[in-house]
Image: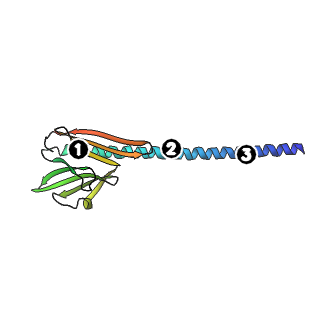
Amino acid sequence: MTKRRSMSFVALMDILVLFLFSVVSIGVGISAVKGFQRIEEDRSDISELAVAMSYLHTRIRQNDRLGAVSVRPSPMGESSALVISEQIDQVEYETWIYWHQGTLLESFIQAGDKRIEEVSSPIAEIDGFEIFCHGSSGLKIRIWCDSHMGTRDLDFEVNLRSSSR
């Protein structure tokens, strides 16, 4: 009888160890998945910031002419917007680049048109955008994304060859 009891005790211990091992394995698996998801979110944020920075820098450089690049109040009332003016077939057009509700947006309209939001296209999903004049011929731009790993932000300056903004 004691032999049977000791065998059933050993079998019970084996089952408990197996159960404990299974619970720990599932916990490690869930933790790994959550860690991977956080890393992927951070990668996505970094990618969106890089897209936004590259886009802004390229648009400013492409249009660096006297009076073509300016900083104005955002049409959505949040912070400021980058406005690029250009003349096409004797008609003045404006490209508005601004941030609204987590998205950097671009709107190409005829100068004076108030339908900026209606004709906007998304550029990148970011959590914030600030732009202001810096010095006599520069722009200072800050873009950022908030995540579980903290705030990722990019600050950069663009010196304009043309002096009027």
Near mark 3 (Cα within 10 A), the count class, few <14, some 14-19 or many ≥20, is: few
Evaluate whether residue 89 shows in this view: no
Q: Secondary structure beneath disc 2?
A: helix
Foreground label between 2 and 1: 1
Residue lying at 25% horizontally and 43% vertically, measured from the top left: 57
Marks 2 and 3, Cα distance to the nearest angstrom? 28 Å
Q: Which amino acid is tagged 3?
A: Leu
Hey, which residue is sitting farthest left in the picture?
A: 90
**In-front residue for pair 161/151:** 151
Residue at 68% of width from left, 44% of height from top? 20
Residue 158 image point, x, y percent:
22, 39
- How would you rate the neighbour count of disc 1 (Cα within 10 Å): few for under 14, some for 14-19, many for 20 or more? some
- Which amino acid is tagged 1? Phe
Say which residue label 1 marks: 132
Q: Quadrant of the C terminus?
A: top left
Q: Percent position (x, y) of residue 39?
A: 46, 43
Name the mark on residue 11.
Answer: none
Q: Residue at x 25, y 38 (%)?
A: 157
Which quarter of the rendered picture does the N terminus lie within?
top right
Q: Residue furthest right?
A: 1
Q: Which residue is mark 2?
A: 35
Q: Is residue 13 left or right of residue 153?
A: right
SS class, disc 1: strand
| Residue 61 position in % (x across, y down) | 20, 43
Residue at disc 3, secondary structure: helix
Mark 2 neighbour density, 10 Å: few (under 14) some (14–19) many (20 or more): few
| Residue located at (74% from left, 46% from top) | 15
* Residue picked out by circle 3: 16
- Mark closer to the chain start, 2 or 3: 3
